[in-house]
Image (cartoon, helix red, strand yellow):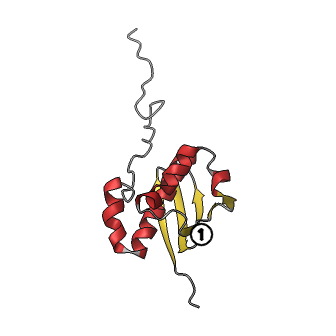
C-alpha cells in the first residue's frame, strides 16, 4: 500500500507565520500539538480555517498538522487558512480556480506601521504648545 502524500506550505498574515502539512485522511486537525477546537475556541476562527475545504466540498477528507507562531489568534487563523489553501493547490492545480476568487491565496499585506523617531507613535504627534 503506498504512503499517503503530504504537501507542506507556509502562510502569513501580519506577524503570524503558519507552517502546515496537509495529507489525505479523515479530517483530523492539530495546531501546535493541540486539537483544532481547543486551539481556536470560537466558531468564527474555526470557520475561517476550514473555509478552503468548504469551498472545495472536501471537509473531512484531509488531515492537517499546523505549527503557527507570532501574531494573535485571528492573524494565526488567517495564516493557517492561507497555508492550507496553498497546499490544496499543490494536490490539484484545478483547485486554484475555486480557491483564488475567494481570496484565500492572497497574502494580506497589511502590517503595523513603524514608530517614527521623535514621535510617540506611528502617526501621533506630541501636543503642540504655541507659548
Snapshot quadrant of residue 93:
bottom left
Q: Residue furthest front?
A: 57
Write the residue at 30% across / 65% down.
97
Residue situated in front as seen by the camera: 101 or 130: 101
The quarter of the rendered structure image containing the N terminus is bottom right
Left or right of 66? Residue 112 is: left
Q: Position of residue 75 (x, y in %)?
A: 51, 48
The quarter of the rendered structure image containing the C terminus is top left
Q: Is residue 36 above or below residue 22?
A: above
Q: Position of residue 98 (x, y in %)?
A: 33, 62
Write the residue at 45% across / 38% down.
115
| Residue on which the image places disc 1 | 26
Question: Can see residue 72?
Answer: no
| SS at badge 1 | loop
Mark 1: few/some/many CA within 10 Å (<14, 14-19, 20+): few
What is the count of numbered marks?
1
Write the residue at 46% across / 55% down.
51
Q: Residue furthest bottom?
A: 1
Write the residue at 42% across / 25% down.
125
Amino acid at each position: 500500500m503506498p504512503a499517503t502524500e503530504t504537501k507542506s506550505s507556509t502562510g502569513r498574515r501580519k506577524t503570524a507565520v503558519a507552517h502546515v502539512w496537509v495529507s489525505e485522511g479523515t479530517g483530523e486537525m492539530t495546531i501546535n500539538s493541540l486539537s483544532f477546537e481547543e486551539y481556536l475556541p470560537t466558531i468564527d476562527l474555526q470557520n475561517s480555517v476550514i473555509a478552503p475545504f468548504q469551498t472545495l466540498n472536501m471537509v473531512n477528507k484531509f488531515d492537517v498538522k499546523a505549527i503557527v507562531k507570532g501574531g494573535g489568534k485571528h492573524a494565526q487563523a488567517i495564516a493557517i487558512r492561507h497555508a492550507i489553501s496553498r497546499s490544496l493547490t499543490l494536490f490539484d492545480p484545478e483547485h486554484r480556480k475555486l480557491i483564488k476568487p475567494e481570496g484565500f491565496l492572497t497574502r494580506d499585506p497589511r502590517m503595523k506601521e513603524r514608530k517614527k523617531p521623535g514621535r510617540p507613535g506611528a502617526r501621533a504627534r506630541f501636543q503642540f504648545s504655541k507659548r
